[in-house]
Amino acid sequence: GVIKQLITANVERDPLKVLVLQLYGTGNAPSVKKSFLKVIGDAVDKGIIVVANTQCYTGNVLLGHYATGAALAEAGVISGNDMTVEATTCKAAYLLGRGDLTTEEVSDLMGVSLRGEVTPSEALSLPPLAGPYQRASRKGKTYY
C-alpha cells in the first residue's frame, strides 16, 4: 500500500541512514505483509538502521512479544525501547555524526542510555497479560 511505497521511495534515497517507524503498542505494525517485510529487509541490507518506536505515550517496544513485532525483528528492525521519536532521531544523528562508529555499533548503542533518554532493557516491565489463558496461567491455573 501507500506506506510500503513511501518507505521504498525513502530507502532508495542515497543519504538515508536511519528509518524510524512509529508503530502501535509494543511494536506492532497494522499488518506484516511479506512485501512490507521485504522492503524493511532491503533497507537493513543496504546498511540503513531501522528503529521501531511506539506511538503510545507510555510503554516500550518489545519486538518479540507478538508475531508482527517478531517478524519485524527477524527483518532486522531494532527496538527503540521507550524513547520518543524525537529522542530516537537526535540520538541517531549524534551517533552517526561522530563518524567513528560502524552501523552495527550505532545499532547496538541505540538501546544504551547515554543521557537518560532510554530506560535500560532490564528495568522495563512487560505489558499486562490480556488473554484469559495468560491471566489464568499466571495464577497457576490452566484452562484448556
Image (spheres, rainbow, N blue to C red):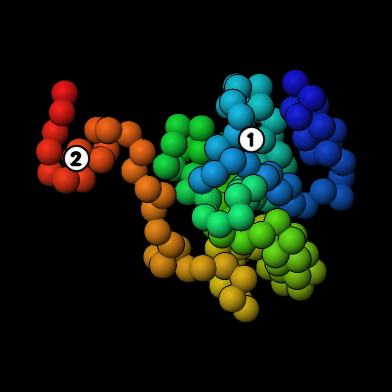
Query: Which residue is rendered at x = 62% and y = 71% of the image?
Result: 117
Q: Is residue 99 visible?
A: no
Mark 2 is surrounded, within 10 Å at the Cα level, by few (under 14), some (14 to 19) or many (20 or more) other residues, namely few
Quarter of the image where the N terminus is located: top right
Percent x, y of residue 134: 27, 38
Q: Earlier in the sequence, mark 1 or mark 2?
A: 1
Q: Label 2 near label 1: C-beta < 8 Å?
A: no
The amino acid type, in three-letter code, at marker 2 is: Ser
Left or right side of 67 for 82: right
Name the mark on residue 41. Answer: 1
Viewer-nearest of discs 1 and 2:
2
Name the mark on residue 84. Answer: none
Left or right side of 133 for 7: right
**Circle 1 — which element?**
helix
Q: Toward the viewer: 3 or 134?
A: 134
Marks 1 and 2, how far apart in space? 36 Å
| Image quadrant in which you'd find residue 105 | bottom right
Image: 137 above or below 111: above
Percent x, y of residue 127: 41, 49
| Image quadrant in which you'd find residue 36 | top right
Query: Which residue is rendered at x = 74% and y = 61% of the image?
Result: 86
Task: Kindly give the residue lying farthest to the bottom in the view shown.
Answer: 115
Query: Which residue is rendered at x = 82% and y = 32% of the image?
Result: 6
Q: Toward the viewer: 53 or 114?
A: 53
Left or right side of 59 for 97: right
Task: Kindly give the residue lying farthest to the left in the view shown.
Answer: 141
Percent x, y of residue 43: 71, 39
Q: Is residue 113 visible?
A: yes
Residue at the disc numbered 2: 137
Quarter of the image where the C terminus is located: top left
Percent x, y of residue 28: 55, 37
**Circle 2 — which element?**
helix
